[in-house]
Image: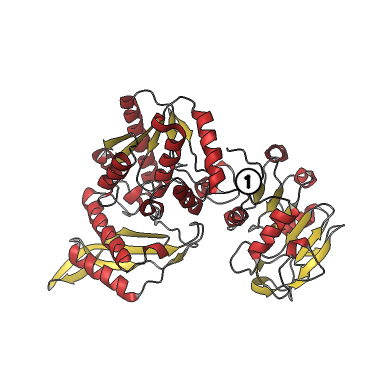
């Protein structure tokens, strides 16, 4: 991990908003890192954080076995901010009490400040807060004072300035809380004393130095798909080590329409990066034949990907490192497999599914960044906007958008559907308003009428979402005529599709991808 001069640690108690807290800290231009709530105190001490934030969580602090950090974390002498469950666990660990009142509190509440606190500087009384809790602090620990309340929660925020301990019952990290970013800034800058010095420019400098130190004079193999993540990885590595980087583009047969030609044109012809093309379409399709279960697909694709890379590496000569576009949300979403507090949703193609006998050392220069930070980094590295602003595309590609069994015919159908959908989004000048747009081919068929004849063909689902970093997402509200045009074109131009659906599921409860 890159060494950061200043850092705020977010201890994750299983909250859906932990990553959002970390994002809000980074928006203050201070580096943040998420760790499980049970991280040993010595590990935290070694990181030399400037402050610690306890996240919320789904448990009740009153329940036996509820998540608690090591007591020594409260004895490090650095500021601590508890949010929701984090406030409650902070309170009980320091001798206070938490009870379940008659009325739980969900939704908006109005802030009533009590006295003056650095935490609420420039936040006015009457500010709307977002509450989501059943338990509440009933008795504060010794040394604490109440600095805010609401109509339904007498102890909404507390502080012990002598020990640098603070807690709030509401969620300042969500957009529903007015001035929430001001509160985070007050904690990070005023209370913890951090300066706003972390930026993509500083990240490039430290990342380049870190890569050069790690790689030395050895060779790095990078999988290049043409998507944002792999493109930025390639540009960053090329800036750091030049021709010691060899990019391999694997055509796994799961790519979008025309993607292979685009990747070769951009990176070999324009950026002059060492690029080796591997046509492995038939290999992947054979390995996936008859497989429908999503996790099995991902693991097969990951396994075949690595094996193809090993073959390409032997053709290139000795290769020491394999570069991947693993991002911070990938790491956090997969950490539960190693005992983290959050439930596994699905293994990520860059984190799960890799064989145990991997013969390369991994290098993952983006694993500390969120998706929007990767786009900023891409601009910092001089990548063109048509790559930097490209919608995310999963490593398993259309393999997890072709729901059910994968065949060459179904993939070609899906490619045509996807191309039409994206073209109509661009025609409507909506591409930049959407975080991710995709099409899925469903494992069902439906009866239709085309050309006065009965048909029994494939069903596709279109999906488009808005998001800041894909941790939460909402479905995009298209003008009806855009969906109508896309549907008409798909049914008329794609031979094996006679029904088009639009997915209006948000995240949560759904994920952005279907598999």
What colour scheme governs how the chains and residues are painted in the rendered image of this protein?
secondary structure
Residue at horizontal 25%, vertical 50%? 258
- Residue reaching furthest left? 452
- Residue reaching furthest right? 142
Q: Nearer the viewer, residue 457 or 252?
A: 252
- Whether residue 399 sits left or right of residue 18 in the image: it is left
Residue 512 appears anywhere in the view: yes
Instruction: From this view, report whether residue 199 is shown above or below residue 427.
Output: above
Quarter of the rendering containing residue 437: bottom left
Quadrant position of the N terminus in the picture: top right
Residue at horizontal 63%, vertical 48%? 197
Residue 62 appears anywhere in the view: no
- Whether residue 135 sits left or right of residue 388 in the image: it is right
Instruction: From this view, report whether residue 397 is shown above or below residue 434.
Output: above
Q: Nearer the viewer, residue 514 or 35?
A: 35
Secondary structure under tag 1 reads: strand
Badge 1 is on which residue?
Answer: 35
Q: Measured from the top left, where is residue 120 in percent x and y? A: 74, 65
Q: Nearer the viewer, residue 125 or 278?
A: 125
**Mark 1 crowd level (few <14, some 14–19, many ≥20, 10 Å Cα):** some
Quarter of the rendering containing residue 97: bottom right
- Whether residue 279 sits left or right of residue 126 in the image: it is left
- Whether residue 359 sits left or right of residue 279 in the image: it is right
Q: Measured from the top left, where is residue 271 in percent x and y? A: 34, 41
Q: Measured from the top left, where is residue 368 in percent x and y? A: 54, 44
Instruction: From this view, report whether residue 111 is shown above or below residue 358.
Output: below
Residue at horizontal 38%, vertical 66%? 503
Q: Measured from the top left, where is residue 288 in percent x and y? A: 30, 43
């Amino acid at each position: 991990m890159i060494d950061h001069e200043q850092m705020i640690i977010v201890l994750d108690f299983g909250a859906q908003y932990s990553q959002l807290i970390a994002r809000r800290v980074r928006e203050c231009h201070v580096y943040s890192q998420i760790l499980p709530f049970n991280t040993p105190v010595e590990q935290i001490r070694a990181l030399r954080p400037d402050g610690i934030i306890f996240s919320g969580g789904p448990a009740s602090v009153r329940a036996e076995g509820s998540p608690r950090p090591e007591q020594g974390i409260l004895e490090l002498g650095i500021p601590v901010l508890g949010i929701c469950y984090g406030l409650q666990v902070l309170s009980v660990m320091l001798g206070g009490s938490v009870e379940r009142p008659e009325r739980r509190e969900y939704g908006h509440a109005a802030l009533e400040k009590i006295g003056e606190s650095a935490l609420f500087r420039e936040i006015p009384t009457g500010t709307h807060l977002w509450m989501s809790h059943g338990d509440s602090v009933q008795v504060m620990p010794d040394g604490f004072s109440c600095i805010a309340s609401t109509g339904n929660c007498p102890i909404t925020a507390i502080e012990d300035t002598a020990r640098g301990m603070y807690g709030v019952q509401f969620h300042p990290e969500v957009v529903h809380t007015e001035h929430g970013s001001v509160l985070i800034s007050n904690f990070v800058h005023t209370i913890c004393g951090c300066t706003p010095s972390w930026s993509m420019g500083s990240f490039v400098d430290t990342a380049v130095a870190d890569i050069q130190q790690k790689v030395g004079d050895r060779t790095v193999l990078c999988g290049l798909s043409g998507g944002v993540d792999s493109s930025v990885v390639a540009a960053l590595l090329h800036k750091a080590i030049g021709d010691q980087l060899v990019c391999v583009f694997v055509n796994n047969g799961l790519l979008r329409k025309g993607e292979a030609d685009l990747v070769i044109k951009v990176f070999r012809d324009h950026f002059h990066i060492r690029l080796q093309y591997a046509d492995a379409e038939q290999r992947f399709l054979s390995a996936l034949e008859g497989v429908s279960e999503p996790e099995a697909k991902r693991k097969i694709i990951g396994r075949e990907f690595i094996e193809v890379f090993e073959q390409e590496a032997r053709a290139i000569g000795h290769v020491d490192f394999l570069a991947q576009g693993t991002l911070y949300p990938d790491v956090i979403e997969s950490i539960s497999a190693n005992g983290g507090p959050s439930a596994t949703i699905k293994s990520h193609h860059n984190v799960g599914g890799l064989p145990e006998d991997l013969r390369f050392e991994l290098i993952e220069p983006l694993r500390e960044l969120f998706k929007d930070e990767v786009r900023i980094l891409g601009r910092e590295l001089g990548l063109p906007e048509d790559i930097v602003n490209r919608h995310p595309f999963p490593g398993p590609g259309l393999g997890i958008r072709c729901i059910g069994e994968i065949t060459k015919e179904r993939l070609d159908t899906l490619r045509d559907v996807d191309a039409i959908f994206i073209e109509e989004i661009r025609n409507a000048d909506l591409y930049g308003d959407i975080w991710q747009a995709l099409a899925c081919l469903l494992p069902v068929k439906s009866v239709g009428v085309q050309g006065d004849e009965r048909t029994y063909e494939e069903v596709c689902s279109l999906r488009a979402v808005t998001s800041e970093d894909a941790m939460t997402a909402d479905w995009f509200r298209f003008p009806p005529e855009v969906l109508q045009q896309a549907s008409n074109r798909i049914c008329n131009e794609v031979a094996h599709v006679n029904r088009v659906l639009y997915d209006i599921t948000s995240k949560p409860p759904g994920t952005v991808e279907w598999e």
